[in-house]
Image (cartoon, rainbow, N blue to C red):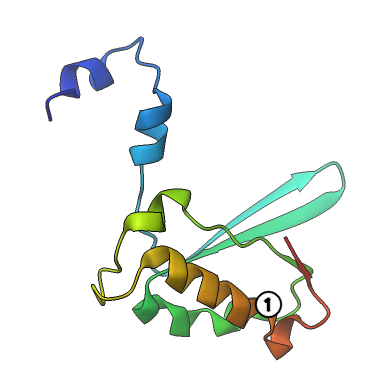
Amino acid sequence: MENIEHIASIDFVPTITDVLNARQRTTGVSETVFSIDDLMFTIVDVGGQKNERRKWIHCFENVTAVIYCIGLSDYDCMMLEDSSINMMHDSLSLFEDISNNQWFKNTNII
C-alpha cells in the first residue's frame, strides 16, 4: 500500500521488480482462443495448486503441445498446501510427471 499513489498514476511504468512480484493465483481452468492468420490456437491455463490438479485431465485430450511454465521466483518459497515442500521442487516433480505421462507420449513439450 505504500506505493499505491505511484502505481495508480497515469504515467506508471512497472519496474522489473514490480513484474517479478506480480503473481495471481490461478484457480480452475481458463481457456483463451485466438488466431494468427489461418491458425487457431487455444491456450489452457490450469491451476497449479495441488487441489486444482485433478481438474486438468480433461484438458489434455488431443493437444499438440504443452507449454510448461515454472515461476523462477519460487526457488525459495514453500507451498501453501504443505509448508514442508519447496514450490520449485514440486513444480519440477510435476513437470517430470507430465512429460512422462501417457497422455503426452506423442505431444511436443515446450
Is residue 69 in view? yes
At a point 59% along the width and 82% down the height, the residue shown is 97
Locate the C terminus by quadrant: bottom right
Residue 47 makes an appearance in the image: no
Helix or strand or loop: what does disc 1 sit on? helix
Name the image quarter holding residue 85.
Answer: bottom left
The image position of residue 63, as x and y in percent, is 74, 72
- In the displayed structure image, the side of residue 100 where residue 95 appears, left or right: left
Looking at the rendering, in which quadrant would you find the N terminus? Answer: top left
Residue sitting farthest toward the left:
2
The residue positioned 17% from the left and 17% from the top of the image is 5
Foreground: 92 or 46? 92
Give me the residue at 39% from left, 23% from top.
Answer: 14
| Tag 1 residue | 99
| Residue type, numbered disc 1 | Ser
Closer-to-camera residue (83/1): 83
Above or below, comparing residue 85 to residue 103 in the picture:
above
Of all residues, the one furthest to the right in this rendering is: 38
Q: Where does the image place residue 50, in percent across and percent down from the top left?
A: 38, 78
Task: Specify the quadrant of the image occupied by residue 64.
Answer: bottom right
Instruction: Count how many numbered circles sit on residues in the image.
Output: 1
Q: Position of residue 26 (x, y in %)?
A: 39, 60
Q: Residues within 10 Å of mark 1 (few under 14, many from 20)?
A: some
Image point (44%, 64%), residue name: 88
Q: Quadrant of residue 108?
A: bottom right
In this view, the residue farthest toward the bottom is 102
* Residue 91, placed above or below residue 41: below
